Image (cartoon, coloured by chain):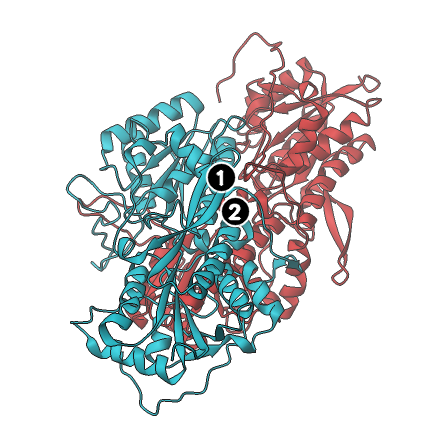
Chain colours: A red, B cyan
Amino acid sequence: MANKKMNAFYAQSGGVTAVINASAAGVIETARKHKDKIGKVYAGRNGIIGALLEDLVDTGKESKSAIANLKYTPSGAFGSCRFKLKSLEANKREYERLIEVFKAHDIGYFFYNGGGDSADTCFKVSQLSKKMGYPIQAIHVPKTVDNDLPITDNCPGFGSVAKYIAVATREASFDVRSMCATSTKVFVLEVMGRHAGWIAAAGALAADADHDIPVVILFPEIPFDRTKFMAAVDAKVKQYGYCSVVVSEGVATADGKFLADQGLKDNFGHTQLGGVAPVVANMIREDLGLKYHWAVADYLQRAGRHIASKNDVDQAYAMGKAAVELAVQGKNSVMPTVVRLSDKPYKWKVGEAPLSKVANVEKMMPKSFISKDGFGITPKCRAYLEPLIQGEDSPKYKNGMPQYTTLKLVSVPKKLGDTFEL
Amino acid sequence: MANKKMNAFYAQSGGVTAVINASAAGVIETARKHKDKIGKVYAGRNGIIGALLEDLVDTGKESKSAIANLKYTPSGAFGSCRFKLKSLEANKREYERLIEVFKAHDIGYFFYNGGGDSADTCFKVSQLSKKMGYPIQAIHVPKTVDNDLPITDNCPGFGSVAKYIAVATREASFDVRSMCATSTKVFVLEVMGRHAGWIAAAGALAADADHDIPVVILFPEIPFDRTKFMAAVDAKVKQYGYCSVVVSEGVATADGKFLADQGLKDNFGHTQLGGVAPVVANMIREDLGLKYHWAVADYLQRAGRHIASKNDVDQAYAMGKAAVELAVQGKNSVMPTVVRLSDKPYKWKVGEAPLSKVANVEKMMPKSFISKDGFGITPKCRAYLEPLIQGEDSPKYKNGMPQYTTLKLVSVPKKLGDTFEL
C-alpha cells in the first residue's frame, strides 16, 4: 500500500470563520500540484460526519476558478460540524467505520481544519496506524476565531474577527460620540469568546494615536466586579462624554456564574435566553442612569469576509498549503503553525507542532496582555494584535454585493453498502 | 440687511448615519465656492442646541483636506442631538433666542441635516421671517437611515445601512448554512426601523440569482402572526436545511404591542430591556425546537462607513451641495430631493420639495413592495432597492484600520453675554 498513490480527505470542523475556505483552497490547490503523491481530494460533507457517513464530495469536480474563489468566500464551503470523536476505548466502532471508509476510497491523507476539539479528533485519527494498523497521515489545519490553539503564534480566522471587532468598535464609537450630548452615552458590544478574551481585546484597537476613543473591555479571564466596572465607565463618560464597552460573551463573576445567565423570565414565566450585552447595558442604566445602546455581533463577526484581514487570509491559505507539504514529506500527527519573526515590520514563517501537544490545550490571554485595571490591553498586547488585522483583501462586488462562491459539491459514489448511525 | 453678505449655520440632527458627514462636506465645500453670497459657515455643536446655546464651530478653521475627509467619516462630526423645537406658541422663547444668536453672528442661512423631526424644526425656522420678522432662509438637508421622508425617492443614509444589512445577512447565511447539519439552523438578525420596514427589506438582497439564500423578513408594517411565521421558517428549514430571519425592531402584534416588549424580569424581579431578536429566537426554539443564533446590529449598521454604498455617499454629498445652491438662488423652506429617472441603468437627478409637505409625514413601505405572504419583498421592491446599495467607496486604511477624521472644532467666540437654559 505504501507505494500506491493515495487519495486525501479534507474536512472543516467547529465554528466556521471568514477565511477557513482559504485554507481549503490552500489544501486543494497544493494537492493538485502533487499529483505524483496525492490522488483525489475528497471533502467530508459536514466535517468528520462526512467520513463516518461516507458522504464525500469530489473536489476534482470543482473548477480551478471555483477553488480560487474560495479564498474570498466566508464560512465552510463543504459544511462543518460540531462532533467530537470519543476515545478509541469509548467508541471503537467509529474508528472502525473511519477505516472502512478510508479503505473503500483509498484515503491515505487526512486533513482536518478546525480548532481545539478538532485537533483532538485529528490526533485520534493520526493514531490509527499505530493502534489499528491502518496507514494514514493526519495533519491538522489550524482554524479558530477564538485564537486559543497553543504553540502557533495565532490562529487563522482570528485576525479577521479581530479586524471586524476593531472596525465595528471604532465606527460605533464615532456614532455614540455624535449622540452623547443629548442621548446615548454608552455603547455596549458583545463579542465571541467563552473562555479566552482575544476577540474582546481587539476592541481596544478601535483607539490609536489618531483616534482617541474610550473603550472599556470585559474579559472572561477577569472576574466581573460591578463596582469597579461602573467606576471605569463613569470615569470615561466624565472625561469623554461617552464610552464604548466591549464585552466577551464568557464574562463571569468570581463564583463562576456567566453574566449572560440572569435567569430571565417573560410575562408567562418562560425562561428567555439573552446575551450578555443587554445585561451589562441594564446594569449601566441602573447604576449610572446613563442612556445606552447595545449590539450583539454574533455570526456577523466571524462571517464578515468583506472586512477580512489580508494577513489572516494569507496565513489561512499558507496553513492549508503547508499541511499538504507536510503530508508529502511523510509527516503524521502534526499541525502547521504561524511562527512570528518580528512585529515591526511584521514577519512570519510556517512552523510545525506535534498534535500531541496541541490537542486539548487552550491558550488564554497572558496576564501581561491585560492592563492592570483589568479593562484594557497593554502595549505588548497591542504589538501582538496589530499585525494580525493588517491588510485588506476585498471580495469582488456585483450590484453592490460581495460575490461568494457556492460549490457544486458533487458526491463521490458510495462504495459501502451499509449505512452508519451517528 | 438684504445686501449684506450673511453667514450660514449648519447642523446635524437626530440619529446619525454613515454618510451624513458627506452632506456636511457638500454644504461646506459648496459654500466656500459662493463667497460672494455666503460668508462663514458656522456649525452648531450638537445640532440645534448649538444655536440655542450659542455654541458654534467655525468650519473655516478646518483644512480643505479635513473637510474632504468628512466624505469618508461616519456619524456626525459636529455632534448631533435629539431635540425638537416646540411650536412658536408653546415656546416662543426658543425662537427669540435663535433670532438673538442668528443676529449676533449675522446668520442668514440655516441648513439643517436630519430626518422627519428635523424637517419639522427646519420648517419652523423657515417661518421666522414671516412670523417674527427675521430674514432667514432655511433649507433642510435630508438624512435618515429609516428612509421614511416623503417626496424624495430615497434618503441619504439609507443606502449604506441597506448595504450593511444585505451584506451581513448574506455572510451570516453562509455561516448558518455551514453549521446546520449538526448545529444552528436559524439565524435571527435584528435591524433598525421602528415604524417603517425599509431596512428589514434590505435583508432580502442577501439572496439573488447567484446566491440562493432563504430569508424570512418580519416587517413592522405587518402584524406579527406567530403561527404563520413559524410555518414560513419551518418551510425554509425543510427546504434548505437552514433559514435566516431579518426582524425589524418595530415588529408588533395586531394589538399594537411591540414584540420586543416581553416584560422580562431577572432573578431579582428587575425589568430587563431586551431586543426583539432574542424574543423571536426563543419562540423558534419553543415552537420548532431548532437551534438558533441571533445578532443585534444596532449602531454597527448605521455607522458602518467601511461598507457604505457609493451611490449613497454621492447622494448625501449632492444633497448638501444642492442645499447651498438653493439658498444662493434665494430659496427658503425647501429640501433638495433625489428624483429617480430610471432603475436600470440607475439614473437620478436633484429635485426640490417644499418643507411644508415634508415635515411630519412618514413614508412607509408601500403594500406593493411586500410579498403576499408578508415575509418577503416583491420584484418591484427589489428594483427600487438594488441601485441604492450599489458601488463601493472604501475609506483609506492604515495599519488595517479605516482612517476617520476628527475635526478641530474651533469655537466661534460668543457675542451674547447671557446664557440660555434648554
Dot 2: within a 10 Å radius of its alpha carbon, few (fewer than 14), some, or many (20 or more) residues?
many
- Of pointers 2 and 1, the one earlier in the residue sequence: 2
What whole-number distance in Å separates the C-alpha atoms at marks 2 and 1? Answer: 8 Å
Q: Residue B311 has which mark? A: 2
Whether residue A335 is visible: no
Residue A153 vertical placement versus B410 (above, below)? above
Q: Quadrant of the C terminus of chain B?
A: bottom left
Residue type indicated by callout 2? Asn
In percent of width and height, residue A5 lies at 80, 18
- On screen, residue B177 versus residue A121, left or right, reads left
Dot 1: within a 10 Å radius of its alpha carbon, few (fewer than 14), some, or many (20 or more) residues?
many
Residue B24 vertical placement versus A153 (above, below)? below
Foreground residue, A38 or B226?
B226
Secondary structure of the residue carrying numbered label 1? helix
Residue A229 vertical placement versus B264 (above, below)? below
The quadrant holding residue A37 is: top right
Chain for numbered disc 1 = B
In percent of width and height, residue A133 lies at 71, 22
Foreground residue, B299 or A105?
B299
- On screen, residue B356 versus residue A57, left or right, reads left
Secondary structure of the residue carrying numbered label 2? helix
Residue picked out by circle 1: B387
Q: Do labels 2 and 1 touch, CB within 8 Å?
A: yes
- Number of numbered markers: 2
Residue under the image location 46 percent in, 58 percent down: B322
- Outermost residue toward the front in this view: B3
The verdict on a common chain for dots 2 and 1 is yes
The quadrant holding residue A259 is: bottom left
Foreground residue, A246 or B130?
B130
- On screen, residue B269 versus residue B162, left or right, reads left
In percent of width and height, residue B152 lies at 37, 48
In percent of width and height, residue A87 lies at 57, 32
